[in-house]
Image (spheres, rainbow, N blue to C red):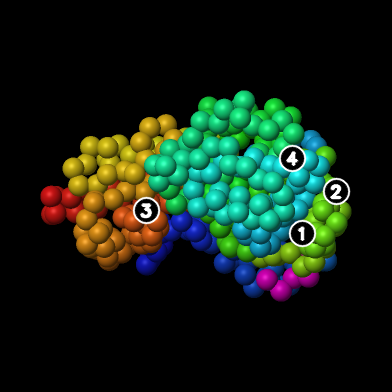
């Protein structure tokens, strides 16, 4: 790693690949032959139109997005989608189903209730969101406008998988994929709409990506603000207003890195599994640290763990930071520690974390 660089285990904004940072640095003053930085470039310029076009094309290749889906580059974070989804989709029966697997799913449901009849059809709140609840298809409303899930739960360290993904039939499946998008291949055709904040695996904070099936566009409630109507952005090519230009440029570079030096999404998924297995294998045999999630619902991206002693947890976080392992403090609702090991975290960072944990355990056992 470059001099003075730390291993950043933050849940987001997260670390970016050095390849991307170095490329952006080399183009900071002048992008190509434009004579200007992307930061100061007009979003109406031909140079930026090429950037956003290349970014979309790369995302489509990386995720194998099928025909019949639009890609929108928006702002407002995933949290804005908690309102944007019901404003656009909750317009036929006025009913939707939600699966509650953590704080963000809970917030999405609470916002959806403002606009229509939103039911909780499954929840893991009874065990502090430490598992993915089974969704009984018989409990789903066939007349619902959509079924909403949070695919990967950043705070609690659980994730859906192809095995546990609800079968929603003709009801569009909507997923918040903020902390798992681009970490492994996903069958996009199983979803009606996917949204993701970029600040985990795709780029810096400020960009929100929406992948939406075309037939779900154009049905917004009459009271929907123009900026919250998917049709507005689809018709304007994501440039109804000034988009987050530099964040889109960095997203393009991340996709270049993913499909270039990293070899593509399948290879990235294998790396992510190796990193997660390395950390979980240690946690499962440790006498000091305990993972908060067991079984097949464990996230590959976010790994919470505790010692059971808040004072010892605090000491670990402090000493880890001194060792160049930063942002390991867990979310207040779980406590302890959390290692977010997104795509840009190299396996060397996970190895250094495990070695530090082994030494800490030896000193404090």
Q: Position of residue 44 (x, y in %)?
A: 83, 66
Q: Earlier in the sequence, mark 2 or mark 1?
A: 2
Separation of disc 3 and disc 2 at Cα? 40 Å
Q: Earlier in the sequence, mark 2 or mark 4?
A: 4
* Residue 60: quadrant of the picture: top right
Q: Is residue 194 left or right of residue 258?
A: right
Q: The residue tagged with tag 3: helix, strand or loop?
A: loop
Looking at the image, is mark 4 or mark 1 earlier in the sequence?
Answer: 4
Is 332 situated left or right of 363 in this image? right
Q: Reading the chain from its start, which is encountered first: label 4 or label 3? A: 4
Residue on which the image places disc 3: 334
**Which type of secondary structure does the marked residue at label 4 adopt?**
loop
Q: Which residues are magenta?
A: 39-43
- Residue 203 among magenta residues: no
> Which residue is at a point 82% across and 52% down the rendered structure image?
220
Q: Which residue is mark 4?
A: 145
Tell me if mark 1 has few (under 14), some (14-19) or many (20+) residues whose alpha carbon lies within 10 angstroms of its own. Answer: some
Q: Quadrant of the N terminus?
A: bottom left
């Amino acid at each position: 790693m470059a001099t003075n660089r730390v291993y950043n285990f933050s849940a987001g904004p997260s670390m970016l690949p050095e390849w991307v940072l170095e490329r952006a640095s080399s183009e900071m003053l002048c992008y190509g032959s434009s004579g200007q930085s992307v930061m100061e470039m007009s979003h109406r310029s031909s140079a930026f139109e090429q950037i956003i076009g290349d970014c979309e094309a790369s995302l489509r290749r990386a995720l194998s997005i099928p025909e019949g889906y639009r890609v929108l580059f928006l702002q407002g974070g995933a949290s804005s989608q908690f309102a944007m989804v019901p404003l656009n989709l909750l317009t036929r029966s006025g009913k939707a189903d939600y699966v509650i697997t953590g704080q963000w799913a809970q917030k999405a449901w609470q916002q959806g209730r403002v606009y229509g009849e939103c039911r909780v059809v499954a929840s893991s709140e009874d065990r502090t969101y430490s598992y993915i609840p089974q969704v009984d298809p018989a409990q789903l409303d066939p007349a619902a406008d959509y079924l909403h899930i949070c695919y990967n739960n950043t705070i609690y360290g659980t994730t859906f998988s192809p095995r546990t993904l609800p079968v929603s039939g003709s009801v569009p499946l909507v997923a918040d994929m903020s902390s798992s998008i681009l970490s492994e291949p996903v069958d996009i055709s199983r979803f009606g709409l996917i949204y993701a904040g970029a600040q985990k695996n795709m780029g810096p904070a400020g960009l929100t990506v929406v992948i939406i099936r075309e037939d779900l566009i154009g049905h917004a409630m009459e009271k929907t603000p123009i900026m919250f109507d998917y049709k507005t952005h689809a018709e304007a090519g994501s440039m109804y207003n000034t988009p987050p230009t530099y964040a889109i440029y960095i997203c393009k570079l991340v996709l270049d890195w993913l499909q270039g030096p990293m070899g593509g999404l399948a290879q990235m998924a294998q790396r992510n599994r190796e990193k997660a297995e390395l950390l979980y294998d240690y946690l499962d045999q440790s006498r000091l640290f305990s993972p908060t999630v067991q079984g097949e619902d464990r996230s590959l991206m976010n790994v919470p763990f505790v010692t059971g002693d808040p004072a010892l947890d605090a000491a670990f976080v402090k000493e880890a930071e001194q060792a160049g392992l930063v942002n390991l403090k867990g979310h207040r609702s779980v406590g302890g520690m959390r290692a977010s090991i997104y795509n840009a975290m190299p396996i060397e960072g996970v190895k250094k974390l495990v070695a530090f944990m082994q030494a800490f355990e030896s000193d404090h056992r």
